[in-house]
Amino acid sequence: MPETIDKKLAKPEKAKKVADPVAASVDQATQQMIRRAQELGVETIFDRAVTMKPCNIGIQGTCCKNCAMGPCRLPLPKSGIEGEDERKGLCGATANTIAARNFARMVAAGCAAHSDHGRNVAEVFLSVANKETGDYKIKDPNKLLAIAPHFGVDVKVEVDGEEVDRNLDEIALEVAQKAMAEWGKPEGELDYLKRAPKPLYERWQKLGVLPRNIDREVVEIMHRTHMGVDQDYKNIVKQCTRAALADGWGGSMMATDLQDVMFGTPFPLQTEANLGIMKEDQVNIIIHGHEPVLSEMIVAASQSQEMIDYAKTKGAKGIQLGGICCTGNEILQRHGVPPAGTFLQQELAIVTGACDAMVVDVQCVFQNLANVAKCFHTKLITTHPIARMEQDNVTHIEFDEHHAMEDAKKIVKLAIDNFENRGADVMIPAQKAAQVAGFGVESIQYHLGGTFRGSYYTLNDNIINGRIRGVAGVVGCNNARNRHNEAHLTLVKELIKNDVIVLTTGCNGIACAMEGLLTPGAAHVYCGPGLAEVCETVGIPPVLHLGSCVDNSRILLAATEVVKAGGLGNDIQDLPAAGAAPEWMSEKAISIGQYFVASGVYTLFGVNLPVTGAPVFQEYLFEELEKIYGGKWDLAADPIEMARKMIAHIDKKRKELGIDKARERVLMDMADRQRLEA
Ligand code: BF8
């Protein structure tokens, strides 16, 4: 044996660096499962985050790989830039152009993901309207009647000079056809844009950013960011605004509405959250991804007596469903199916050794799930034609709405059959927390509405009198570069402590649920006195879970309702409100951020933003956009600083509205009361 090889062989193998579970997550169940994975030699994202560092140039947003002369890399010099910024790519593209192109492409991808989800929902709705499937029905006809006029569809018809209700099937078909056209109509603008407050719509119109159709805005970004096309960062931002609006006020909003029509509009319900919802003596099916078209059927199939009986024949006591990510949020909101965890816990659900099947559709699914599943008995099932995995232990069962129940039963049966294959390595963490979820525009109106439940009057009144200081939308992902859930929870707790009511969606909602923040009881523990008083009186949690990431459209419409109810200005930008995504990671988050900014919301992101390598472009997003749209971007890696900035913005808006004095409430004594009565 040559000496060199001999020496190599003699060298002890270097221990692989792994994550410190406590440094990786604030959640004890997550820490336990990271430790468990390491004991079993199973690598997870937490370990990879330790060994792989992000690219320092990509993180600044100044790497251009849009042609084969590059990648051209333009990092900020360590000494900073004095005088003119002379950095250029081979073609002469400036740092501003490169960062703006990259930013716009993220918006395009985010808009595409949300809107393609919306399109799939619209297609299923068209099948329902055409009576091509018996498995889905119109569950909420009132919601259909509420959205039809926004598509220009009449809900009344004149018969013999009298106005009567129009046939529901006719309305459904016309709505379905109109909705489908939103992705590619040749002229006009998206139908839903006029749902925004009038001054906001008129501003978009004046600025020329009304989206024409969804697909066109995405395609146009890809064209304009191709080598040698748009070289003005302001003009690029204009187009990504148009695409982002097509997402928030288009694709996402239609996804939410049509899902409500078919699957039911959420209303508050009680359940639990975290990995502890899995059960050792039951068949555990974890549903992960984003489109509820499939998961709705899995819920129905797993609740059927036929499947429950079948599970019992295999020695299980029943079937336990759990969700991960936003498809989890969808079935949480409508059926009370408990979430097993956030984005960063997907591998860990398998590490419990008790996950009999993980069923995935689209978005936020780690390819490493297949590698983790290989170490256990878990069946990993892909279901969507556009989202398959290369690993050979993955089963693909393509889901089709025309035989939806049949497909769903096939999947549930596969999970049941796998129950008996569990190994001895089962370890389910005990942690789970109670939660009340299922809020939406309609239920907020019900709980915080006026005397006749007709408006957001009570909410507005409590904002005006200062019990509620303001409203925050806190949304978005986990990011393995952050300690799991730490920024989410620190930010939300700081906001509610300062009487800011929080509307949540996405993985933030799941994180808050795991911490017990989604219970009415949390008001007493965590809130300032004003917000606590409102929550305790009405019986709501201080953090209202509005659903999945497409349901951020519910936040837009809730804000619009607040404007309509009066007393807080004429536009979303006037409201004492702010938005944040403290642990974002997805391109969808950038699209969401841009549509909130363009709708007038001060929006802060944590972690980092890939714009810091182009300071002029960054300043445009962080300062100039406010003069154009009323909202702007900001960045704060520290959640307490983020909360401070949001509260400062809320207070600024209160002052502009002249309601800043209302917060200094005077307690009346008996003499004051007698004076009043006199
Ligand atoms: O759409 S919050 S990690 S699951 S991207 Fe993904 Fe982010 Fe979670 Fe939902 Ni939204």
Image: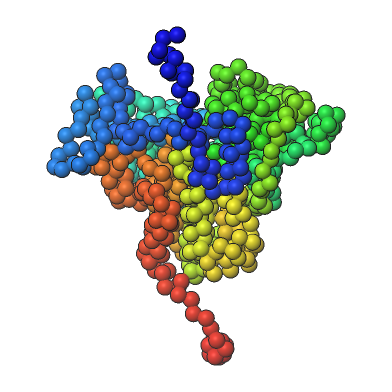
| Position of residue 260 in the picture relative to residue 79 (left or right) | right
Q: Give whichever of 584, 10 is nearer the camera.
A: 10
| Quarter occupied by residue 158 | top right
Q: Give whichever of 78, 619 is nearer the camera.
A: 78
Residue 628 image offset from top left, x and y in percent: 31, 48
| Position of residue 38 in the picture relative to residue 407 (left or right) | left
- In the image, what residue occupies the spot 32% across and 44% down? 621
Residue 13 image offset from top left, x and y in percent: 48, 25
- In the image, what residue occupies the spot 53% across and 88% down? 672
- In the image, what residue occupies the spot 30% across and 20% down? 67
**Can residue 76 be spotted in the picture?**
yes
Residue 395, compared with residue 79, is above or below; it is above
Residue 182 image offset from top left, x and y in percent: 49, 32
**In which quadrant of the rendered image does the C terminus lie?**
bottom right
| Position of residue 326 in the picture relative to residue 231 (left or right) | right
**In which quadrant of the rendered image does the N terminus lie?**
top left
Q: Give whichever of 353, 646 is nearer the camera.
A: 353
**Can residue 572 be spotted in the picture?**
no
| Quarter occupied by residue 281 | top right
